[in-house]
Image: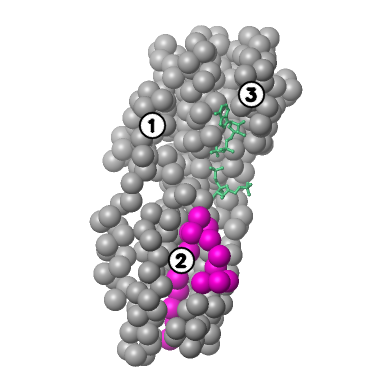
């Protein structure tokens, strides 16, 4: 393998820059060249591609976002667009590709692998919604932002004796709400994996009030929806004042945590080593603290399940 391509696709995630840096430097260390493909599959189709050197990836490890930028590209999902992508890879003499992104990006990577193009997927999404890996890149940084937000909101919530709903990201996966809630000492995490029981939530709030608790914080995963309607319902049942904060894209930016920088560096280097060793169609991940790789189709076929132990613990600690 002479030349490796690298792209970031879908939603960006803190730690992607560390992964790009590791891809570039590990490839060069192993005697290969690197082509940086800008704006994901969109940039591939447009030939927005340039050679990356050791220096190209200097001064990025501490930055959020992705130096290669990202895009959501509908054309690549069509047969014609996909074939054009394969042609562009050939035209730029790219022999193998590292795709850094979430499950959508992995679907594109899987198709490339099935078409015989050596491709490796690196999980980059704050949602932590890829089931084959314990953690995806960006999740730890997003959690840190969420926990800081909970801390700030807790102060004002206590002063006013209010209930606060904090909506966090996670379309189909409640991990940010669940783990953020546990780390931030929230009263409840309302997540797509567990049907919401408003009476149960209100009982917890009222029990806390009787005990003299000054605030209640509820983390709501965006996939569950409608925070303002939920706020009204809670006021009706408890009589308490409820405020809503939607922290949105604040969670997707910012300097990556050390864990995300380390994970990104390890993922990126491992992806290059797999290509170097002739492996293809693999998804890179982490289990325990060990790097793993498995067939990308198998990785995509797995179903994300709720971590019941963590969910139960969060419930117990919120009594
Ligand atoms: N079935 C598919 N075939 C080919 N490309 C796909 C497919 N699904 C998604 N992609 C590509 O991956 C991009 C990113 O997917 P998306 O779901 O938006 O984000 P993420 O990778 O973060 O989950 C899409 O815009 C598209 O270009
Ligand atoms: O970039 P957009 O369109 O605002 O997307 C928002 C979505 O992206 C995410 O941040 C990450 O999702 P993906 O990584 O699957 O793209 C979701 O939590 C959120 O719903």
| Mark 3: few/some/many CA within 10 Å (<14, 14-19, 20+) | few
Q: Is residue 218 magenta?
A: yes
Please provide the residue range marked out in magenta. Answer: 214-230
Towards the viewer: 60 or 3: 3
Q: Is residue 47 above or below residue 306?
A: above
What label does residue 261 carry, if any?
none
Which residue, given by chain and number where applicable, does mark 1 sit on?
Answer: 301
Image quadrant of ligand 1 equals: top right
Which residue, given by chain and number where applicable, does mark 3 sit on?
Answer: 78
Q: Is residue 75 above or below residue 139?
A: above
Towards the viewer: 35 or 7: 7
Towards the viewer: 205 or 64: 205
Q: How many marks?
A: 3
Towards the viewer: 295 or 274: 295
Find out if the beta carbon at label 1 lies less than 8 Å from the nearest ligand 1 atom. no
Residue 199 appears left or right of 12: left
Which residue, given by chain and number where applicable, does mark 2 sit on?
Answer: 219
């Amino acid at each position: 393998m002479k030349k490796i391509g690298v792209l970031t696709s879908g939603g960006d995630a803190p730690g992607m820059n560390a992964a790009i840096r590791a891809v570039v430097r590990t490839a060069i260390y192993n005697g290969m060249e690197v082509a940086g493909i800008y704006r994901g599959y969109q940039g591939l189709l447009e030939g927005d591609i340039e050679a990356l050197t050791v220096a190209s990836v200097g001064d990025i490890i501490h930055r959020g976002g992705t130096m290669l930028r990202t895009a959501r590209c509908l054309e690549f999902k069509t047969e014609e667009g996909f074939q054009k992508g394969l042609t562009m890879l050939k035209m730029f003499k790219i022999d193998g590709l590292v795709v850094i992104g979430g499950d959508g990006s992995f679907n594109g990577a899987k198709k490339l692998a099935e078409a015989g193009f050596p491709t490796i997927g690196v999980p980059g999404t704050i949602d932590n919604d890829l089931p084959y890996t314990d953690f995806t890149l960006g999740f730890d940084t997003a959690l840190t932002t969420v926990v800081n937000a909970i801390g700030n909101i807790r102060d004002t919530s206590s002063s006013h004796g209010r209930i606060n709903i904090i909506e966090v990201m996670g379309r189909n996966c409640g991990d940010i709400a669940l783990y953020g809630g546990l780390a931030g000492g929230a009263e409840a995490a309302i997540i797509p994996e567990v049907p919401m029981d408003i009476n149960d939530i209100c009982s917890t709030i009222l029990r806390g009030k009787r005990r003299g608790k000054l605030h209640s914080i509820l983390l709501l995963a965006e996939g569950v929806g409608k925070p303002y309607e939920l706020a009204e319902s809670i006021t009706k049942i408890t009589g308490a004042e409820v405020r809503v904060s939607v922290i949105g894209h604040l969670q997707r930016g910012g300097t990556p945590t050390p864990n995300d920088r380390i994970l990104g560096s390890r993922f990126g280097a491992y992806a290059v080593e797999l290509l170097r060793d002739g492996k293809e169609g693999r998804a890179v991940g982490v289990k325990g603290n060990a790097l793993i790789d498995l067939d990308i189709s198998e990785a995509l076929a797995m179903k994300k399940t709720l971590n019941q132990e963590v969910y139960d613990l969060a419930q117990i600690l919120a009594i």
